Image: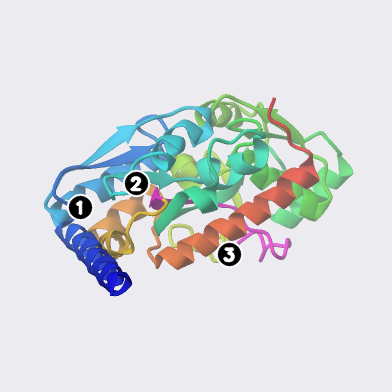
Amino acid sequence: MKNRCRTAFALFALSLFGAAGVAGAQAYPDRSIRLVVPFAPGGGTDLTARAIAQKLSEALGKPVMVDNRGGAGGVIGADLVAKAAPDGYTLVMGTPGSMTINPNLRKNMPYDTLRDFAPITQTTISPFILVVHPSLPVSTVKGLIALAKRRPGAINFGTAGNGSVAHLAAEQFKAMTGVQITHVPYKGSSQSLIDLLAGQVQMVFENLPVVLPHIRAGKLRVLAVGTRTRSALLPEYPTVAEAGVPGYEASTAFGMLAPAKTPKEIIGRLNREVVKILRSAEIKASFGALGLEPVGGTPEQYAEHLRAELARYAKVIKTAGIRIE
């Protein structure tokens, strides 16, 4: 009899706990939300986060505050969220650097991307564009490959630094084409771009928003775009895969994540609201002007994207022998 009573009481307690959890999720949010951007203000991640945060504040009826926590290629800000309470009040904008590149480069990562985060949705994708200085006598990807093979090591490519997305985009190109081009790392995209415009380096793989004004001004020549499909902003230019390197892909994908073990009801609510924002005409127009393409999708789809990118970057990094000291 005693055992039956204990069992009944335990089931009753569990039901109350479950009901409280559901009620808590239904009441979400009841205070402000912090959206961590693991980079300094003004970059692509920050611009994406602020546009979404403003609309999400309106949708949820509570402030969504952007908190810039830069450092270590996005690792510092991401780690802060990985260790935050899983209650939906601390979120992070995920980037390749913080979620899929550094986990393959650094030996002592403070978090595991797939274990310590709960994906909400992929937010945007920014195509990487293969551009060259007008003085380089090529106008196609095949022409670039032919020139690089005739002059091994003579063509320099600039990047935002060793292990950056731009660096890996170029290393992937090298591995898939067999060309020898010389890496010139800088401390950021802006410095790399300055030297490209001056002709000190001859080519870069760079995010579309960074190079778009210079393309439109005729200061840089586009050879191809890195995404699987052509860019809506530059539809006249082929993808790298179309232009002679089948299977090539390079882009920067942003997404929103919460700490692992955040209740599914909260993840679902955030997913629905953010996807609705991404599908709005206003956001499509504002992101399009920046060279960003809204994505959306389910948490499961974003999780699969992260798994695939972790595997892809692992292969590129191993093939290129990239090390971070």
Amino acid type of the residue that numbered disc 1 sits on in the rendered structure: Lys
Residue 157's quadrant in the figure?
top right
Query: Looking at the picture, how far across and down is residue 140, in whole percent?
Result: 69, 55
Amino acid type of the residue that numbered disc 3 sits on in the rendered structure: Arg
Residue 295's quadrant in the figure?
bottom left
Which residues fall within the magenta stretch?
A: 238-259
Say if 14 sits above or below 104 in the image: below
Q: In the rendered structure, are the residues bearing label 3 and label 1 in contact, judged by CB atoms less than 8 Å apart? A: no
Q: Mark 3 points at which residue?
A: 228
Q: Is residue 138 visible?
A: no
As helix, strand or loop, the secondary structure at mark 2 comes to: helix
Q: In the rendered structure, are the residues bearing label 1 and label 2 in contact, judged by CB atoms less than 8 Å apart? A: no
> Which mark is on residue 55?
1
- Toward the left, the furthest residue is 61
Amino acid type of the residue that numbered disc 2 sits on in the rendered structure: Thr
Quarter of the image with the N terminus is bottom left
> Which mark is on residue 48?
2
Q: Earlier in the sequence, mark 1 or mark 2?
A: 2
Near mark 3 (Cα within 10 A), the count class, few <14, some 14-19 or many ≥20, is some
Q: Which of marks 3 and 1 is nearer the N terminus?
A: 1
